Image (cartoon, coloured by chain):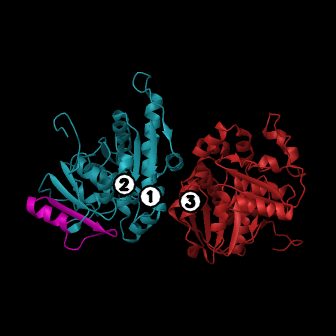
Chain colours: A cyan, B red
Amino acid sequence: MQVSLIPVATAVNPAALHGTTAVVFDVLRATSTIVTALASGYRRVYPVADAGIALALANERSFVLAGERRGEKIAGFPHGNSPLEFIGGPDTAYHMSEISKGPSFNNNVWKTSDDLVLTTTNGTKAIRRAQSAHKVLTGSLLNARAVAQAALREGLDINLVCAGTAGRFSLEDTLGAGFVLAEIMRQLSQATSEQHTASINMDDLAITAYGLARFYHNDPLSGLFAGRHGQKLLRLGLEEDLHWCAQLNRFDIAPVFTGKYITVCSAAYAC
Amino acid sequence: MQVSLIPVATAVNPAALHGTTAVVFDVLRATSTIVTALASGYRRVYPVADAGIALALANERSFVLAGERRGEKIAGFPHGNSPLEFIGGPDTAYHMSEISKGPSFNNNVWKTSDDLVLTTTNGTKAIRRAQSAHKVLTGSLLNARAVAQAALREGLDINLVCAGTAGRFSLEDTLGAGFVLAEIMRQLSQATSEQHTASINMDDLAITAYGLARFYHNDPLSGLFAGRHGQKLLRLGLEEDLHWCAQLNRFDIAPVFTGKYITVCSAAYAC
C-alpha cells in the first residue's frame, strides 16, 4: 500500500487520485469544524468553494450557513469557521470545560437544520479538488484514529491531501496527516496477518509528516501554535479554537465526501 | 532573523534570496561529497551543471573530474559522486574503520590537483540556483554545526535550500536542513545576549524540518535509509555512502560558494 502526501491542494493532480483513497486535511479549521459539526448532530456538510453559491444554496434550502475568508467570518454570514460554533450535541458540549477556562462558549448554533453549508479559504476547495479519488475522507487531529481505520479498510493506496494556506505548505495540515499515519502504522502493527497483509510504502513527504507527528505526539497543541496560520488565529483572538482542534482522537467518526456533501456513513445512513 | 526552507531547488525564486544567506543541501550526496573533499585537502570544488562543460574545464585546467547522473558515475568520468572517493586526508581516513566493516575503502583518489570539478543531477544545479544570495554555504549532516555557526555569523535572514531529487521533495535534504536548524537553536540558546540578540522566526517548512531532525536525532542513519533516494542508493550497492553521510558534525568547516567555486575561507585563504 503506497501512502503519499500532497503538501498543498493546489498541487493535486486529479488523475493521480483515481483509484485511491484521499484524506483531506485543513486542520485549522475546516476539517476540524466539519467533524465537530457531524459529531454534534449535523447530518450533511456541503463544502462550497464560492461564497455566493454557498449563500444561495443555504437560502434556497434553509440550510445553516457558515463561511470564512482570511480567518474571519464572511460579512453577512451567520457563522464563521470556528468548530466552537457547531458544538452542542451530547458528544461535545460536556467536554468544553476540560479545555477552556474562558467564558466564550455560549455561541452554539441554534441548529435549525440537519444541513450545514460551509465555504472556507482553503479547506472546502481542497475537498473539491480531491473528488476524483475513489473515496474522499476528511481528517483532523480530532478523528485521526477513525480516519486511519476507514482508510485502511478501503485497502487502496492513500493520498494525504493537505489543504495548505493560500497555496503554501502549512505545518498543521502536515501534522494532521502525520497523526493519521501514526495511527495507520499502529493499527497495522497490532493487526493479525489475516486482518492486514499490506505493508506500507510511504513517500518522503509522508515520512516527514510521520516524523513531525512523533515529534509533537505528547503536545499537539504546541504544533498548532507554532505554525504561521496558528499564529494568525492567535492574533485574531481564536486561541480556544486551537485548543479544540488539538484534541487527538476526540471523535470516532470518519466523514466521507460523496461528491455533493460530507457525511458519516452508517448502517442506518448509507452513502 | 527569518529562517525559511525551500523544499526543492527548482522552486527557488532568485530575487527572494537577495540579501540573505542561503545554505544548500544535497545530503545524498553532492554537499556531503563537497565537504568531504574540502576536508580532505581539496582547495576548490567547481559545481558545474552540465557534464560536457565539466569535462572541458577539467581537461583544460588538469583538475580532478567527478560526475554522477541518476545515482551512477557518468560514463567515461574518472570519478562519481561518492564522498568515499575523496577521502584520504589526515582528517578523514583514520575514521573510516569506525563506520565500516567492509573492505571497500581502497578507492581514494590519487589527488593530482587542488581542484575538483563536480557535476551531479541535483546538487550542483541547486548551488548555482542559489547564487543570488548574499552568501551561499553548502550544508550536510557532516558539517551541520559549522554551517549553523557561519550562517548565524552573517546575521542575515537564512534560506535553507533543499536540492530535492529531480524536482521532488527529498527526506534527506530536509533532514540536513533540520539538523542545521537544531544547531542554530542550540547555539542561540547558549549565546549571551551580547553575542546574539536575534530571535528566530521559522516558516512552517523550517519548523517541520526541525521536528524531523529532532525525531531522527539519535539515529540520523535511519533517516537516510528511509527516503526514496536513500533506498535507490542502497539498491545500487552504496550503503557505505549512507553511513558516511550520516555522521553528524564530522567536519568543522563551512564551505562557501564564491560564484565560481566552493571553498573554505580562512585567514590564510580569503574568499
Q: Which residues are magenta?
A: A52-78
In this picture, residue B221 sits left or right of residue A12: right
Read off the residue under disc 2.
Answer: A245
Identify the mark at residue B8; answer none if there is no mark.
3
- Give the letter of the chain under mark 3: B
Helix or strand or loop: what does disc 3 sit on?
loop
Front in this rendered view, residue B210 or B190: B210
Residue B61, above or below B214? below
Helix or strand or loop: what does disc 2 sit on?
helix
Q: How far apart are labels 2 and 3 at the CA level? A: 30 Å
- Give the letter of the chain under mark 2: A
Total labels: the figure holds 3
Quarter of the picture holding the N terminus of chain A: top left
Residue B169: x and y in percent read 54, 54
Q: Label 1 sits on what residue type?
A: Leu
Quarter of the picture holding the C terminus of chain A: top left
Question: Are the residues at dot 2 and dot 1 in contact (C-beta closer than 8 Å)?
Answer: yes
A60 within the magenta span: yes
Identify the mark at residue A224; answer none if there is no mark.
1
Front in this rendered view, residue A215 or B21: B21
Front in this rendered view, residue A245 or B271: B271
Q: Earlier in the sequence, mark 2 or mark 1?
A: 1
Q: Residue at x 65, y 62 (%)?
A: B125
Label 1: few (<14), some or many (≥20) within 10 Å?
A: many
Q: Residue at x 78, y 40 (%)?
A: B99
Residue B28: x and y in percent read 67, 50
In this picture, residue B215 sits left or right of residue B83: left
Q: Label 3 sits on what residue type?
A: Val
Regarding residue A217, the answer to whether it shows in the image is: no
Regarding residue B12, the answer to whether it shows in the image is: yes
